[in-house]
Image: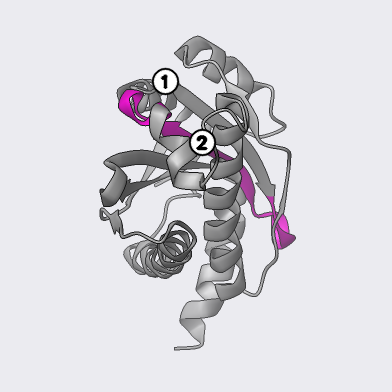
Amino acid sequence: MNASDLTEDQHDCLQELINVAMGQASDQLARYLDTFVYLRVPSIEQVRSEHLFDSLNHDLKATAIVSQGFFGYEGIRGEALLMYQPLDSNRLADLLGYEADELSFDEQIIDLSSILTTTFLNVFARQIDNQMSYSAPRLLSTNLSKVNEHLQQQSFNWDYALKVKISYQVTDYSFNCDMVLLIPEEAITNIKTVIDRILADF
């Protein structure tokens, strides 16, 4: 077993933290958009760097990808990727209440991505007595090699990564997007320490 592997209890605790954050984030998003947001059960898996990009390739059926780094106390950090499906791009203005020509597509997609990323991660951080800061969101090419290059430029150890995938569906607009959180090996170890502290309180 790798030192950064999660035990069953740690995995279950992390899953519950994600479920709570996801639920509160979707509720806030639903209130913001005045519509219902459907959530699928999130997936959590640990992948090696050489398999990470194969895994992403399976997910990258998107016309737009926005990346945003996040940084918390106790060495908790990572990268969030927001992936939007091809049929959704013309629904962004309606979702955000903009006029069709008020903002460019790039500005709209970055705006929505920042809302989704920071809402979820702020709720997650509060549960573990942490606080997140964020890099500026960046619109990426949908080419896998370009996404790979972007991630490799980050100051992370990507030998292993914890991959968390969350899917949002806004039913009134037939709108779908996936949030993929990538947490590097060193940060997994730090998250385990926080989770163990939470488990010890039960």
Q: Is residue 183 visible?
A: no
At x 55% / y 67%, what residue is drawn?
Answer: 123
Does 69 appear in magenta?
Answer: no
Q: Quadrant of the C terminus?
A: bottom left
Q: Give the number of the disc on residue 63.
A: 1
Part of the protein shown in magenta: 71-89
Q: Could you tell me the amino acid type at mark 2?
A: Leu
Query: Measured from the top left, where is residue 14 in percent x and y?
Result: 42, 64
Ranked by sequence position, the earlier of labels 1 and 2 is: 1
Q: Is residue 5 visible?
A: yes
Q: Is residue 102 left or right of residue 36?
A: right
Q: Could you tell me the amino acid type at mark 1?
A: Thr
Residue at image mark 2: 81
Does 77 appear in magenta?
Answer: yes
Residue placed most toward the observer, 72 or 5: 72
Element class at badge 2: strand
Element class at badge 1: loop
